[in-house]
Amino acid sequence: MNPLINFIYILSAALFIFGLKMLSSPATARQGNRLSSVGMLIAIIVTLMHAGLDYKWIFLGIVIGSGIGAFVAIRVKMTDMPEMVALFNGFGGISSLLLAWAEYNQNRELSVFIALVAFLSAFIGGVTFSGSMVAFGKLSGKITQKAVVFKGQHILNAAILVIALGAAVLFCITPASSLGYPLFTTILLVALAFGITSTIPIGGADMPVVISLLNSYSGLAACAAGFVISNNILIVAGALVGASGIILTNIMCKAMNRSLANVLFSGFGSTTAVQSGNGPQGEVRPASTEDVYYILEAADSVAFVPGYGLAVAQAQHAVKELGDLLEANNTEVSYAIHPVAGRMPGHMNVLLAEANVPYDQLVEMDEINPRMDTVDVCVVIGANDVVNPAALDDASSPIYGMPIIETHRANTVIVLKRSMNPGFAGIQNALFFAENARMYFGDAKASLQALVAEFKND
């Protein structure tokens, strides 16, 4: 390959790496995203110029893809962001599958190594695509969010893997034989089936981990595809996505105090749903808008704890306005973020950033918990499992051992919820019955707007 092309690819890779690094902080995430996008644009332009492709088809694909992407990005609701991420992961997977398939169609005389990476690209890409479609269905409510388990499930998955590996071995040995194409087709079908059977048993509570893992799969598939077509930048970009996805998956698992194997094979949603009615019982203490106003008005420090309910109600701007009014009242305001709050990694960070909440007010779980005893009021907005004290003191609870934001240690807890329904884990929340907790029932956005009106009328 032309040394100049390699140099430009190295420049693109450097932009990817620096951009990825900047994504680790909310303050620099947007700039990092732009930097990575510039790196990818440079890589695409150089590849097109070097490969001598027919530009009219490439241009048509860019126009159609960009149009669809822009339309979806503009129209998507914040509550639908996890579904969109799942779709993007799936499209990345199917792209790698199709690339490997197209390369094999053009050249059946593959070396053992190229045949191996073609198998990996097709298989991982297929698993990513069908698994992401299942994740999309669960997140969007088009299929049940509960874990779908059945007798012999693990045996079926093991059998699928054995078939895939057997077909892969035969394919790598004789890719140019008459059996090559049937074997490759078998690999494609088995991959799509395995994506479904390995994702359908995972419940909605574990979707943040699944999205991270599927993102990693899409990167690994792209990396393998890079070897298939001997493209260095695709190898590097795929490896970066794959590695970062695995790291994020590990972080998410630690935040839930569960192993990846437990997430993938335990059927979590099916076991907890049975126990959802056996949670703690007691008397809840409802609070009116006026009650909550007087509690907040007298507080020196307030910590908001957002959850998926905040996204559902589209209440991010209302909570930002309330936070501004509290600051004007000389109240210290912060936003406590749990790593798995919402339905995808970073969901709450993105949601609050949309409302221009200052980055220095976003506080991670490990930072807020040590000083929770000094917080006057915790306002829980749509969060459930990530603030459930059962994770700390109920060994029989399915979420026992999961690190939580310890809101129950604050002087007062205000919980904004529509009803007493449990969260994704399907279990009742002991926090709702705590002596220092008050339940502020209603739509989160309407409730927050009512509090804003109280402060403005004061």
Image (cartoon, rainbow, N blue to C red):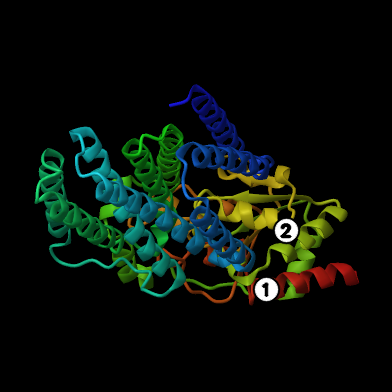
Of 249 and 165, nearer the camera is: 165
Q: Read off the residue under disc 2.
A: 355
Quadrant where the image shows the C terminus: bottom right
Across and down, in percent, residue 389 comes to 48, 55
Label 2 element class: loop
Q: Amino acid at mark 1?
A: Ala
Mark 1: few, some, or many residues within 10 Å (few <14, many ≥20)?
some
Q: Quick check: can you spot residue 401?
A: no
- Viewed as shown, does residue 182 lie left or right of 442? left
Q: Is residue 383 above or below residue 17?
A: below
Label 1 element class: loop
Across and down, in percent, residue 263 comes to 32, 52
Q: CA distance from mark 2 to mark 1?
A: 27 Å
Q: Amino acid at mark 2?
A: Ala
- Viewed as shown, does residue 189 lie left or right of 129? left
Residue pictured at 48% horizontal, 50% vertical = 54
Mark 2: few, some, or many residues within 10 Å (few <14, many ≥20)?
some
Quadrant where the image shows the N terminus: top left
Q: Quick check: can you spot residue 107?
A: yes
Across and down, in percent, residue 414 comes to 65, 64
Of 328 and 408, nearer the camera is: 328
Of 361 and 132, nearer the camera is: 132
Q: Read off the residue under disc 1.
A: 287
- Viewed as shown, does residue 81 lie left or right of 135? right
Residue pictured at 23% horizontal, 66% vertical = 149
Residue pictured at 90% horizontal, 72% vertical = 457
Could you say which quadrant of the image residue 250 lies in?
top left
Across and down, in percent, residue 334 comes to 71, 49
Q: Earlier in the sequence, mark 2 or mark 1?
A: 1
Residue at the extreme right: 458
Q: Nearer the viewer, mark 2 or mark 1?
A: 2
